């Protein structure tokens, strides 16, 4: 009969160094990617971002699609900066933002592959949150 501790404890727990490396990788990605994608909302060099905006959003918000993308870009830049400076908080902001993007893509239809990819990113943002150290007060 196994004791409860042996059932729940991993056979090989990651070392503190491995955990820190995973934290740094996730923190870097969730800082850089939102900032780059946010900046691109102003230039549309990577893609025409308005294609990914559900018409339901443009009917609710009294702004042209590109103006909405400017707001989206600013939020993404701020989310990336939040991850850089306060990763525990910023990772939740990014996860919530990704959830909003996923919902938008599901409402839009036709971009289910992108929605699935963003779900994977959302899980990564939550993993970053779990790895982020608590702020000492």
Image (tube, grey):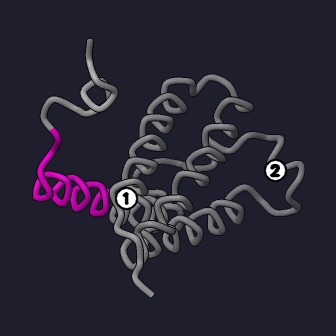
Quadrant of the image containing the C terminus? bottom left
> Looking at the image, which residue is at 29% across and 32% down?
5
Q: Which mark is residue 30?
A: 1
Mark 2 highlights which residue? 58
Above or below, comparing residue 8 to residue 130 in the picture = above
Quote the CA–CA distance across marks 1 and 2.
27 Å
Quarter the N terminus occupies: top left
Along the line of sight, the residue nearer the viewer: 83 or 137? 137
Instruction: Give residue 29's quadrant in the image.
Output: bottom left
Secondary structure type for disc 1: helix
Up-down relation of residue 51 to residue 107 (above or below): below
User: Which portion, as a residue range, is magenta?
Assistant: 13-29
Nearer the observer, 12 or 44: 12
Locate residue 43 relative to residue 11 in the image: left or right.
right
Query: Which residue does the image show at 53% across and 67% down from the upper left?
Result: 42
Residue 41 placement (x, y as % from top left) = 53, 62
- Rendered location of residue 60, percent (x, y): 89, 52
Disc 2 is placed on an element classified as: helix
Q: Is residue 52 visible?
A: yes
Q: Is 110 situated left or right of 29 in this image? A: right
Q: Nearer the viewer, residue 114 or 67?
A: 114
Magenta stretch holds residue 1? no
Q: Look at the image and say whether residue 24 sits in the magenta stretch.
A: yes
Instruction: Please tell me how crowded label 2 is: few (under 14), some (14-19), or many (20+) other residues with Cα within 10 Å.
Output: some
Q: Is residue 2 above or below residue 119?
A: above
Question: What residue do we see at 19% from left, 60% from top?
Answer: 20
């Amino acid at each position: 009969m196994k004791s409860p501790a042996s059932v729940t404890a991993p056979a090989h727990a990651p070392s503190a160094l491995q955990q820190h490396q995973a934290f740094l990788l996730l923190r870097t990605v969730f800082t850089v990617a939102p900032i780059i994608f946010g900046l691109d909302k102003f230039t549309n060099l990577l893609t025409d971002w308005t294609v990914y905006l559900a018409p339901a959003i443009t009917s609710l918000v009294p702004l042209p699609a590109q103006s909405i993308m400017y707001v989206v870009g600013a939020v993404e830049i701020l989310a990336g900066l939040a991850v850089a400076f306060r990763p525990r908080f910023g990772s939740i902001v990014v996860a919530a933002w990704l959830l909003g993007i996923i919902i938008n893509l599901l409402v839009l239809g036709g971009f289910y592959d992108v929605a699935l990819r963003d779900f994977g990113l959302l899980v990564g943002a939550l993993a970053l949150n779990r790895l982020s150290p608590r702020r000492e007060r």
